[in-house]
């Protein structure tokens, strides 16, 4: 048994040995194979270092590819064998302890860079050789015109020994002479080529101006032209060339011959096509990738009048759970299966499917009328996902959400179209998924506005764009003002004053609700101190209290109790000046850990109010374990009292809640009082305090102070 190399240097040399054995048979070097191996060793070391470098640099592969040309590895087979060798052995012998997937990705990028560097260096070398031959041929023009007598031997040596194809024809297009390189390119004998006329060498891929340039040259109107041209070989294959045709004149300056120099670019073209394919297609699924899709989408949205497009934006539902539970390999197989199914859905002219990345796919259809076509395409996609996918013996159910955008060309940019499809897809996902939704401009505008507000939230607090309005809390027994609820507002530079329903959910989603809530608490407590100082002795019997809302996110903030205590102490306000309102839904099923901060605050003397009581499926028995001192009835209870006589069922419900609350030593506050009849009825039912437009709308703190003074002097 042969022992594997131990140290990194041994493994590196082993890789260089394998590489040299693979490439040496197709090189034109005069070195022996061991000498050639020593030439490859520093290149192998460069690849190894690039593979394992902390900061990956794929251009190292380009340097290695160019070095192969310098080492006389100019046969196309040398590049193919090199890429195969690097693909098979570089990670194995030089990867070390790195992440295998990352190393394979790096190796692939190094191979692409090597191919690009090799092609560039080979092209530069060939062009240099071609230029030398062209110069020699031009210097020999006079010799050709004079029957090539004085220096025919020198020209013949260049003509026959050149690596590129050379042909000479008369002005009628009849081929007079060709060299061996040209016969090898076409795969025919010299006699066969010399019997041809160049005008018969047409190809469907010829550039439109090719034969116009040819006619200008033989008329003596131009000296040369350079084009890329394809030729048919007798075996049915296509020969691609860089073709340079020059006019040869006689001693008197009259056009006499045409000289063609041909560089075989077939292998390079195939390599470029391969690199182009890899650059525009997804490596996992083989579908067009994001860049290729954007090219097609741009053409679709910029098509001429009368053209339309339809776009389906698909995101798999629950794909992350597949990766987390079964691993990324299973997730990749699922994506491949989904890609195959989607490809089968878009086979009509003008349709394509692409993978944008992750589990996101798009399907595009174009034509004069895509309204029905895009609906049918979305339906086909949803039906294609119905059948389970079998992976590792498991039957996986595939679900997806699709956003559909359809419209005329010329009205929106590709980015706007894709954004609308993305927004619509998430709307379908929010509606439960496994469906497709059509784009709605109004819904798009709301989402874009919401996103803009979310983006502006962090800096809005720093810029001082938030302010607080206060709505009085009135005692139903004597009509006195007992305090106020603090309601935060956002003075947005573009949208004006925004209520909390517009931005509080966004603040909760982004986590900004914690610093925003801390700011509201600090401002409100400071305002409560000012009220108490201004009211003085008149408010001694019933000091003004401030109610501040707490969001569910704030309840889980570990700094809630500490921040509240610091704010009260810094303001010099007693805890009984503060009431924290927590929604009933936030406390349904709350465990002891969640209730512990509220209990600590309640023990300090801070009132806790259960806000929106009656809107959830609350268990009234839970009231015994909650550290609340106030029940705040939702405004839905007061709506039934707007008519006369009031709904007796609503009255009984409120009467029962008030009785229960008072039996538990809880005060009752009612929201949404808009009429005197409601206020009187709530007073009869035994409610303690109320707030609503009947008393005052939310406003600046000065108005509350004025109301409190009126009550004190009235």
Image: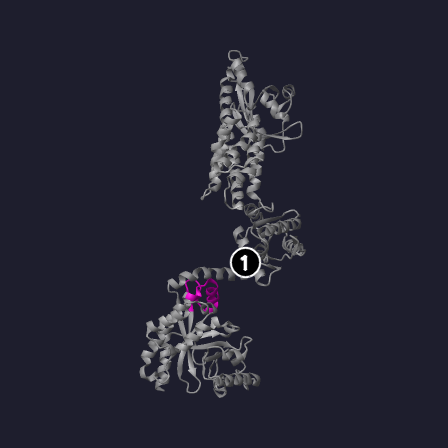
Q: Which residue lies furthest to the front in this view?
A: 1
Picture quarter with the C terminus: bottom left
Residue 358, compared with residue 675, is above or below; it is: above
Instruction: Using a 10 Å C-alpha cutoff, classify the residue at mark 1 as few (fewer than 14 neighbours), some (14 to 19) or many (20 or more).
Output: many
Magenta stretch: residue 192 in it?
A: no
Magenta stretch: residue 507 in it?
A: yes
User: The residue tagged with tag 1: helix, strand or loop?
Assistant: helix
Q: Nearer the viewer, residue 322 or 188?
A: 322
Q: Is residue 405 visible?
A: no
Picture quarter with the N terminus: top right
Q: Which of 581 and 147 is in front in this view?
A: 581
Residue 408 location in percent, x, y? 58, 53
Name the residue at 36% across, 79% down.
Answer: 705
Q: Can residue 19 be seen in this view?
A: yes
Q: Which of 362 and 28 is in front in this view?
A: 28
Q: In which quarter of the image is residue 431?
A: bottom right
Residue linked to disc 1: 423
Q: Give the magenta-colored segment's residue range.
A: 489-514
Name the residue at 56% across, 52% down.
Answer: 358
Residue 424 location in percent, x, y? 56, 58
How many numbered circles are shown?
1
Residue 181 location in percent, x, y? 58, 22
């Amino acid at each position: 048994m042969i022992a594997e190399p131990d140290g990194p240097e041994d493994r590196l040399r082993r890789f260089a040995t394998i590489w040299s054995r693979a490439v040496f048979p197709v090189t034109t070097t005069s070195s022996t194979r061991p000498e050639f191996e020593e030439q490859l060793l520093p290149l192998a070391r460069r690849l190894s270092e690039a593979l394992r470098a902390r900061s990956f640099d794929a251009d190292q592969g380009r340097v290695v590819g160019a070095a192969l040309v310098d080492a006389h590895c100019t046969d196309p087979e040398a590049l193919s064998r090199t890429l195969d060798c690097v693909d098979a052995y570089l990670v194995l012998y030089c990867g070390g302890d790195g992440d295998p997937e990352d190393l394979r990705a790096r190796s692939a990028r190094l191979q692409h860079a090597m191919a690009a560097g090799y092609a560039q260096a080979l092209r530069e070398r060939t062009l240099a050789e071609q230029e030398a031959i062209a110069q020699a041929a031009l210097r020999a023009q006079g010799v050709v015109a004079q029957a090539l007598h004085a220096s025919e031997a020198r020209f013949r040596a260049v003509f026959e020994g050149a690596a590129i194809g050379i042909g000479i024809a008369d002005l009628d297009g009849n081929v007079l002479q060709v060299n061996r390189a040209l016969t090898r390119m076409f795969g025919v004998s010299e006699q066969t080529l010399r019997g041809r006329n160049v005008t018969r060498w047409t190809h469907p891929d010829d550039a439109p101006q090719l034969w116009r340039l040819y006619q200008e040259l033989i008329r003596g109107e131009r000296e040369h032209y350079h084009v890329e041209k394809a030729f048919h070989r007798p075996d049915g294959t296509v020969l691609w060339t860089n073709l340079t045709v020059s006019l040869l004149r006689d001693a008197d300056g009259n056009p006499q011959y045409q000289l063609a120099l041909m560089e075989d670019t077939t292998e390079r073209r195939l390599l470029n096509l391969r690199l182009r394919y890899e650059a525009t297609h997804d490596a996992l699924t083989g579908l067009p990738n994001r860049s290729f899709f954007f090219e097609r989408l741009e053409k679709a949205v910029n098509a001429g009048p009368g053209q339309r497009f339809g776009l389906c934006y698909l995101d798999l539902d629950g794909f992350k759970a597949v990766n987390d539970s079964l691993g990324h390999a299973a997730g990749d197989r699922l994506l491949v299966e989904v890609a195959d199914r989607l490809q089968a859905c878009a086979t009509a002219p003008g349709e394509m499917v692409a993978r944008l990345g992750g589990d996101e796919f798009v399907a595009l259809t174009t034509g004069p009328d895509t309204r029905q076509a895009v609906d049918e395409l979305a339906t086909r996609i949803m039906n294609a996902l119905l059948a389970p996918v079998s992976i590792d013996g498991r039957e996986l159910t595939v679900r997806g959400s699709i956003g559909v955008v359809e419209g005329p060309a010329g009205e929106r940019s590709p980015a706007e179209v894709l954004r609308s499809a993305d927004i619509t897809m998430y709307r379908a996902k929010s509606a439960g998924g496994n469906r497709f939704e059509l784009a709605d401009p109004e819904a798009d505008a709301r989402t874009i506005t919401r996103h803009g507000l979310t983006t502006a939230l962090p800096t809005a607090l720093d810029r001082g764009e938030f302010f607080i309005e206060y709505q009085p809390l009135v005692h139903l027994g004597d009509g006195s003002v007992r305090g106020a609820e603090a309601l935060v507002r956002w003075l947005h530079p573009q949208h004006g004053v925004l209520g909390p329903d517009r931005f509080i959910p966004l603040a909760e989603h982004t986590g900004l609700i914690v610093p925003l809530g801390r700011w509201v608490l600090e401002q409100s407590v400071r305002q409560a101190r000012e009220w108490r100082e201004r009211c003085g002795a008149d408010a001694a019997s019933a000091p003004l209290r401030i109610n501040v809302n707490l969001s569910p996110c704030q309840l889980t903030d570990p700094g809630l109790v500490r921040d509240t205590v610091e704010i009260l102490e810094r303001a010099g306000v007693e805890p009984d000046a503060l009431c924290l309102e927590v929604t009933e839904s936030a406390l349904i099923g709350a465990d002891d850990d969640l209730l512990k901060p509220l209990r600590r605050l309640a023990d300090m003397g801070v009132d806790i109010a259960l806000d929106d009581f009656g809107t959830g499926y609350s268990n009234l028995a839970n009231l015994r374990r909650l550290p609340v001192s106030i029940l705040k009835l939702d405004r839905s209870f007061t709506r039934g009292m707007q008519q006369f006589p009031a709904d007796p069922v609503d009255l009984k419900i409120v009467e029962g809640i008030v009785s229960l609350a008072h039996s538990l030593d809880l005060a009752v506050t009612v929201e949404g009082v808009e009429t005197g009849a409601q206020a009187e009825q709530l007073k009869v039912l035994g409610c303690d305090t109320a707030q609503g437009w009947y008393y005052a709308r939310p406003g600046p703190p000065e108005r509350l102070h004025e109301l409190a003074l009126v009550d004190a002097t009235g």
